[in-house]
Each structure stands twice: as C-alpha cells, then as structure tokens.
Image (tube, rainbow, N blue to C red):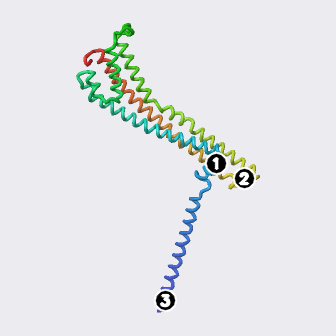
Amino acid sequence: MTFLNKIHRAAVALAGGLMSMAFLATDALAQGEKVSVENPYGLSALWAQGDLVAKSTLVILVIMSMGTWYIAVVKLIEQGKLFKQAKEAQEKFWNAPSVEAGIKLLNEDSAFRYIAEEGHKAAHHHGNTMTASVDLNSWIGMSLQRATDTIHGRLQGGLAFLATVGSTAPFVGLFGTVWGILHALTAIGIAGQASIDKVAGPVGEALIMTAIGLAVAVPAVLGYNWLVRRNKAAVDHVRHFSGELHMVLLGGKKG
C-alpha cells in the first residue's frame, strides 16, 4: 500500500506540474496576441498618428493602386472580347458570299464589323467630286487605316495611367519615407536623446510608405508590359483582317 501511495502522490504532482505549465503557456500566448493586436507602429497607427501630409501621401498611393487594378481588369476584358471577335470574324465573315452578307453576320459592337463597314462604304462611295482624283486603292487603304487606328487608340486607352503609376509610385513612397525620417529627426531634437520610443514611430511610418510605394509600382509595371504585349497581338489580328479585306474590295469578288 505504501508503494502504491507513493505512485499516486507522484502522479498527482506530475499532473499538477503539467497543468501549471499549460496555464503559463496559455498566458504567454494571450500576452503575445495582445502585443500583436495592439501594435503601435502598424498601418492603423500610421493613419491615426500621421499628419495631413502623411495621410495625403497614403491616399494618393491607394488611389493609384485602385486605378491600376481597375484598368488592368477592364483592359483584360476588352482584349478578351477583341480576341473573341477575331475568331468570330474568321469563322463567319470569310465564309459569307459577299462583304455585305459578312457584315450582317457580325455583332454590332464588333471591331471587325466596324472595319468592314468602313471599307465597304469607301469602296462604294469612291468617285464623288472630292474623291475622284484619288485612286480606289489609296482611298480604300486610307479608310481602313483610319478604322484600324481608331481601334488601336481604344486599346491603348488607360495604359498611360499604368505607365505613370509604375514610374511615379516609388517616388511618392520615397516622399513619405523622407517625411517620416524628418519626423524622427524632429522627435530626437525635441527629446534631446535618440531613444527607441521617440524614433520607432516615425521610422516605422517611413518604412511603411516605402513598402506601399513599391507594392503599387510593381503591379503597374508588370500589368503595363503584359497588356502592351496582348495589345500587339490584338492589333495584329485587326491589321491582318484589314489587309485581307482591302484585297477583297479591290478585287470585287465579295463586294
């Protein structure tokens, strides 16, 4: 019995020790969560403690980021529609018995229908008083070139904003960095000593501005390069269609 009592007492002591360790670990985790939630140098603290210049810089970066993602999504949808229209024109327009019949087979908002209508109109209105001195080849070519340039201009819309954001966002973030460092130096000058609690906030503000500036600029640059490459492929489809239509209108086989 004595031996069993000793074992029982040892088990009770071990269980008590484990429970104490568990409570200590739980308390440590709770304290760690409290520290992470109440971070005085995070983004919320930057907005709460920042002055008008810091808040304005942050708002500008947010607007740049929102505009970048909006334009990227819109341009991707627009390019996807143009690629779909190119496939539709290849399947329907060139299998029609005439240009007029092919135009009717395309959707009204199709870029390729717009080019076909402009070319068909130029071919059938040539020879008027003002256009009599221009040969048919040049007249149709100019009309198709104008239509192609119009579509190309629509595809290019918005890309200038991405290029601007990609080139200026790092400097806007750098301005926020300089402003944060200025605050740190001011705090040191007022306090008369470089204690960590005096400089941690402004330096953290500076680092956050730098990070946000880079986070805004990198997607803008990558999106610009990707969209420009896709635009080139889309315009190639449009120019190929325009060139074939030019030959058809001159030949009169599908007029």
Residue receiving disc 1: 50
Residue at (27%, 30%) from the top-left corner? Answer: 91
Q: Earlier in the sequence, mark 2 or mark 1?
A: 1
Side of 161 relative to 105 (left or right):
right
Residue 42 in the image, given as x and y percentages of width and height = 59, 53
As rendered, which of 93 and 223 lies closer to the eye? 93
Side of 123 relative to 201 (left or right):
left
As rendered, which of 75 and 15 lies closer to the eye? 75
Side of 144 relative to 53 (left or right):
left
Estimate the spatial distance between the alpha carbons at disc 2 and disc 1, rounded to whole Å.
20 Å
Q: Could you classify mark 1 by the number of other residues whose Cα lies within 10 Å: few (under 14), some (14-19), or many (20 or more)?
A: some
Type of amino acid under label 3 = Asn
Residue receiving disc 2: 194
- Which label was assigned to residue 122? none
Q: Could you classify mark 2 by the number of other residues whose Cα lies within 10 Å: few (under 14), some (14-19), or many (20 or more)?
A: some
Residue 58, image quadrant: top right
Residue 163 in the image, given as x and y percentages of width and height = 52, 33
Quadrant in which the C terminus appears = top left
Q: Nearer the viewer, mark 1 or mark 3?
A: 1
| Residue, far front | 129
Residue at (25%, 21%) from the top-left corner? Answer: 98
Residue 77 in the image, given as x and y percentages of width and height = 39, 37
Residue receiving disc 3: 5
Q: Nearer the viewer, mark 2 or mark 1?
A: 1
Instruction: Answer whether labels 1 and 3 touch (C-beta < 8 Å).
Output: no
